[in-house]
Image: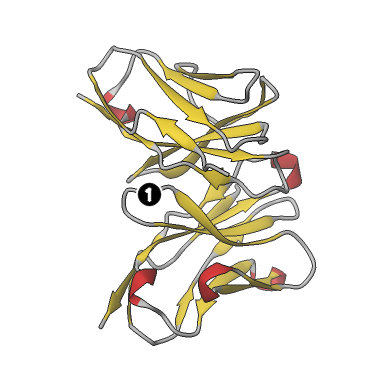
Amino acid sequence: KAGVTQTPRYLIKTRGQQVTLSCSPISGHRSVSWYQQTPGQGLQFLFEYFSETQRNKGNFPGRFSGRQFSNSRSEMNVSTLELGDSALYLCASSDMGARETQYFGPGTRLLVL
Amino acid sequence: AQSVTQPDIHITVSEGASLELRCNYSYGATPYLFWYVQSPGQGLQLLLKYFSGDTLVQGIKGFEAEFKRSQSSFNLRKPSVHWSDAAEYFCAVGAYQAGTALIFGKGTTLSVSS
């Protein structure tokens, strides 16, 4: 099976812009979770989507949003970018969620100038 | 507060020597515990996981970890380190109630010397 894919792999934006990142889970997986990784804060959970519904949400401002499509592909959107949003954004997929292994993609590295 | 602590930011081990990476957690619910590894420019790869049962769990690449509830620890071990093990290692904790939301430690960078 193909692994989790994320596009684009690298992105440069300027403050105030918005950005959309995409994640394609492993075939058959219905849960997609998003994480932000920064040197200062480490890995932090953003949100999880399961069968097109947000099932769980971390402690991030409303500028961070996401959605999931019927084929389980997921997108996350960050509006009004700030310098502090520069990070590696990782998505992870699993079949059902909690007790299942989460498989991570390679990430999208976002640089906000 | 729920947290994961990896006390060692950076560890250097000689090739062939044994390795132990420490992880302590604070979590209100019965925890699920994980160790992930991240190589530069890569995503996270699961090494092993503990949900319940035998407290000594075996993982990939010759790694093992032991869950000690009394010490709130889940240390990762490997008897003989290979140069290819150089990477960053993350301990994470979750729970059924939290769904897929994992809390990660800040990571331990492992360097392997020849």
Residue drawn at 74 percent across, 51 percent down? B29
Element type at mark 1: loop
Quadrant (top left, top right, bottom left, bottom right) of the C terminus of chain B: bottom left
Residue drawn at 56 percent across, 72 percent down? B75
Q: Residue A110 at x, y = what percent?
A: 31, 30
**Above or below — where is B26 with respect to B60?**
above
**Above or below — where is B63 with respect to B18?**
above
- Number of disc labels: 1
**Above or below — where is B26 with respect to B15?**
above
Q: Nearer the viewer, residue B51 or A83?
A: B51
Give the amino acid type for the residue marked by disc 1 in the picture.
Answer: Gln
Mark 1 — on which chain does it sit? B
Quadrant for residue B70, please give it. bottom right
Residue drawn at 69 percent across, 39 percent down? A95
Query: Callout 1: 10 Å neighbours few (<14), some, many (20+)?
Result: few
Q: Residue A107 at x, y = what percent?
A: 40, 38
Q: Residue A22 at x, y = what percent?
A: 45, 25
Q: Nearer the viewer, residue A46 or B5?
A: A46
* Residue, disc 1: B42
Residue drawn at 39 percent across, 14 percent down? A79
Q: Is residue B23 left or right of residue B9?
A: right
In the picture as drawn, the residue positioned furthest to the right comes out as B53
Quadrant for residue A111, please give it. top left
